[in-house]
Image: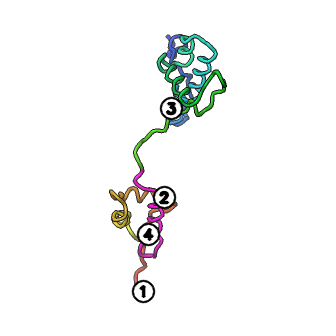
Amino acid sequence: MTRGCSSAENPSFYPILPSFLPTYLLTIIESKNDAATRAQALTLLQKGVAINEIIKDTNYARRSIYNILKKAKDRGYDPSKDTQILLSYIEDAPRSGRLKKYTLEIEEQVINIISQNSTTRELFTQKIANTLALLIKGGISARSIYRILCRRGYKPCKLTRKPGLT
C-alpha cells in the first residue's frame, strides 16, 4: 500500500512541497483563497463553463463562486462592457484588525526623549512609557516603546561606568 494519495482520490490534493520552506510560505502556497484562484473562477464563469467544472477546478463551493461574482460586480466588473478582470475586482477587502497604540508622532516623541541628552539615553523603557502616558490617551506599554526603539535601530545595552581613579 502506498503512503501518498493521488489527485483523483482526493480533490483537495496539494503537491508535495519541499520541507525546507518556512511554514508561513507553505500556508501561502497551499491557500486556495488567493486572488489568482478567484480570477480563475470568475474567468471560467464568464466563459460559460459549467459550475460543477468550476467547483472541481477551484475547490470553491457553489455559493462562494457566486459571492465572488457578486463582489466583483459591486466593485465595477461588468462582463457585457469589458471582459478584463482587474485585481481591484477580486482582491481581499481590508480587514479592520486591532488598531495600533502608537503613530509616527508618538515614535518621534520617543526618539526625542531618548536623544535629548546622556541622562535620558539611560532611561528604561518603562520610564519612557510613564513619561509618554500623560500625552497618550490610554497610555503606552514599555513593550511598545521597546518595539519602537528596535524598529529605529536602537539596541539594548548595559551602562558601564569606570571606577574613580585615585
Q: 47 above or below 120?
A: above
Disc 3 and disc 4 in contact, CB within 8 angstroms: no
Disc 3 and disc 2 in contact, CB within 8 angstroms: no
Question: SS at mark 3?
Answer: helix
Which residue is outermost to the bottom? 166
Q: Which residues are magenta?
A: 100-120
Left or right of 165? Residue 66 is: right
- Find out whether residue 7 is within the magenta segment: no
Mark 4: few, some, or many residues within 10 Å (few <14, many ≥20)?
A: some
Residue 66 in sight: yes
The amino acid sitting under disc 4 is Ile
The amino acid sitting under disc 1 is Leu
Measured in 3D between alpha carbons, the distance from the residue under mark 3 to the one under mark 2, in whole angstroms, is 32 Å
In percent of width and height, residue 90 lies at 56, 30
Which mark is in front, 3 or 2?
2
Measured in 3D between alpha carbons, the distance from the residue under mark 3 to the one under mark 4, in whole angstroms, is 41 Å
Residue at the (46%, 76%) spot, across then down: 117
The amino acid sitting under disc 3 is Thr
Residue under label 1, please give it: 165
Left or right of 41? Residue 102 is: left
Question: SS at mark 4?
Answer: helix
Residue at the (61%, 25%) spot, across then down: 78
- Residue 146: image quadrant is bottom left
Which mark is in front, 2 or 1?
2
Residue at the (47%, 61%) spot, across then down: 105
Residue under label 3, please give it: 27
Residue at the (61%, 12%) spot, across then down: 49
Disc 4 and disc 2 in contact, CB within 8 angstroms: no
Task: Compare marks 1 and 3 and give the one earlier in the sequence.
Answer: 3
Residue under label 2, please give it: 104
